[in-house]
Image (tube, coloured by chain):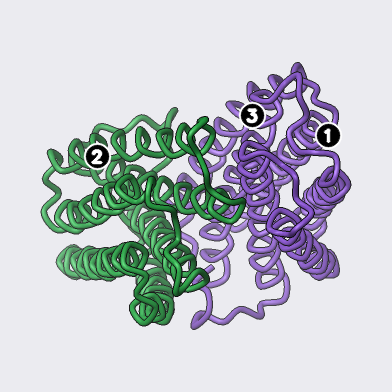
Chain colours: A green, B purple
Amino acid sequence: MREVFQQELREVQEGLVELAGLVADSIEKATRAFNESDVSLAEEVIADDDRIDQETVALDELAITILARQQPVARDLRIVVSALRISASLERMGDMSTHIAQLARYRFPDKVVPKSLRPTFAEMGRLDVEIARRLVELLRTEDVHLAEEIRNEDDKVDALHLQVFDKVLGETWKGEAVDTVDATLASRYHERFADHAVSIAKKVQYLATGDWDPEKSAL
Amino acid sequence: MREVFQQELREVQEGLVELAGLVADSIEKATRAFNESDVSLAEEVIADDDRIDQETVALDELAITILARQQPVARDLRIVVSALRISASLERMGDMSTHIAQLARYRFPDKVVPKSLRPTFAEMGRLDVEIARRLVELLRTEDVHLAEEIRNEDDKVDALHLQVFDKVLGETWKGEAVDTVDATLASRYHERFADHAVSIAKKVQYLATGDWDPEKSAL
């Protein structure tokens, strides 16, 4: 029974790695669609979100089946519950990618943000892609150093998020209302994407080190 | 054992009702703070979010304990797993309230949005409060008609959300960039608040009617 359980846990882990890979592809394409106003790439991201949603559901069903059949307790139980939480966060990360792609599609053939903000968004996008790639590795290897790196990169995304507001609310901002709306939303989506990654990274770190604090997080 | 389980399930349900009640109080105060630029009420909402977070963690720990001790299967298992998902959504609803209150605090003593948008936001806020109150009732009674009403009200919130963008991007918009940013964010927070309520309502409806579709949602 124990062996079956370990095998099923591996399947869950592989499922999470695969799902995170889809999310990483999604944000990479969304970022490119956003930077280059590539409407067909944006459409691709939007269409692919269905697959992310389906894989999330399949993974959740697997986790629930394991709970029913294996009746895990203690740490094993927390692993399965945290898989349910991680998949929910990955699904939301896919939604954020999709929202970024939708902005690119709405504004096509224009670019989403004016020139002065493009380097900031290019950097935010680059960081989100890097965070997503590290997340895949973290889920695959449980190397907790990666969790630390994801947190550091999230700090950088947060700083850029504030920078966007500084620019938009600054005296030199010449954007129209539509530019202000787009910059606000795009920045929020990039920031939320990274936040979800951090919340996943924390869970993996807790599970890998056994160092979780139920007062702070139920996993 | 079955009796103990039923008792524990009731505790989970009561916990969810209580948590939803805190969220309803939170959005009611946040909405008032936003409409009336009441900074002390805004501070109260922000401070109270800790309690929502703590209750969420406590409820999740209870659910995990039930999984470990009672080893539920089939519908019973789905009830407990869905409780974990519902608490996560309620916690996010509390975050949305807090964000709305933070906007009121940032702009104090100014109001958050210019006059032309205030009736729209007052109506969005009113709907969010109503949705939250119905959610408390839905969780308490499992009366699925309430789920339907929540969905209808969410449709109204979505329509108002689009109206905000129509106004902000329209020819008559005279707002500064800061007004545009605030309107964009505030509208997004109100819309997400209602979305989370709909996702909870769906879960309760599925559980009450047994009518869930694992292809669409793992609960």
Q: Say whether marks 3 and 2 touch (CB < 8 Å).
A: no
The relative height of residue B49 versus residue A98 in the rendered view (above or below) is above
For label 3, count other residues whose C-alpha is less than 10 Å away and answer few (under 14), some (14-19) or many (20+).
many
C-alpha gap between disc 1 and disc 2: 36 Å
Q: Quadrant of the C terminus of chain B?
A: bottom right
Q: Position of residue A91 (x, y in %)?
A: 41, 64
Residue at the far top: name it: B40
The residue to which callout 3 is attached is B102
Q: Position of residue A158 (x, y in %)?
A: 37, 36
The residue to which callout 2 is attached is A153
What type is the residue that disc 3 sits on?
Answer: Gln
Residue at 65% x, 40% y: name it: B182
Q: Position of residue B128 (x, y in %)?
A: 78, 50
Q: Position of residue A166 (x, y in %)?
A: 46, 32
Residue A78 in sight here: no
Q: Quadrant of the N terminus of chain B?
A: bottom right
Of A109 and B74, nearer the camera is: A109
Query: Residue B146 appears in which quarter of the rendering?
Result: bottom right
What type is the residue that disc 1 sits on?
Answer: Asn
Q: Earlier in the sequence, mark 3 or mark 1?
A: 1
The residue to which callout 1 is attached is B35
Disc 3 is placed on an element classified as helix
